[in-house]
Image (cartoon, grey):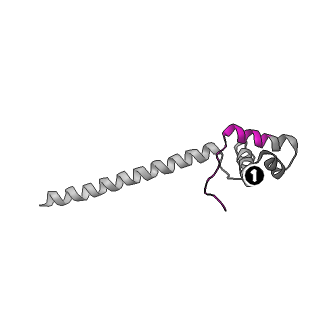
Amino acid sequence: MGSNYTKRYTAEFKRDAVALVDSTGRTVTEVARELGVSPESLRGWHKRAKADRGGGRPGELTSVEREELKRLRKQNAEQARTIEVLRKAAVFFAKESDR
């Protein structure tokens, strides 16, 4: 039976696992089996590391760019909420001044 628990690995572990794939010529699946991680996880880490080195697909974001995009989207959402509150307040006060 499956579990909703996802094991977390340190950045150092991920870096070392990716380095093993790159330096040994072994497949992602072989290295993953040896380390006891899922091949899907190691494949994702390897892909991300490649993109971070500038070797990703055209238009693929690096980790730094992904984090910045996440931060900017959060900031944008907060600003949109603030603008909505201010808009409602302006409507309320406009109605009050008409009385």
Residue 16 magenta-drawn? yes
Q: Is residue 10 left or right of residue 73?
A: right
Residue farthest along the front direction in this orientation: 1
| Residue lying furthest left | 99
Residues shaded magenta:
1-19
Residue designated by label 1: 43
Front position in the image: 29 or 22: 29
Residue 14 coordinates in the image, percent (x, y) = 71, 42
**Residue 74, horizontal then vertical, whole percent:** 48, 49
Count up the numbered dots: 1
The residue under the point 73% across, 55% down is 40
Q: Residue at x 24, y 59 (%)?
A: 91
Q: Nearer the viewer, residue 92 or 11?
A: 11
**Which kind of residue does numbered mark 1 sit on?**
Arg
Residue 11 percent coordinates (x, y): 67, 39
**Residue 16: quarter of image:** top right
- Name, please, the residue furthest toward the top: 12
- In the displayed structure image, the side of residue 26 where residue 79 appears, left or right: left
Please state, as top left, top right, bottom left or bottom right, where the N terminus lies in the image. Answer: bottom right
Q: Residue at x 65, y 48 (%)?
A: 7
Q: Residues within 10 Å of mark 1 (few under 14, many from 20)?
A: some
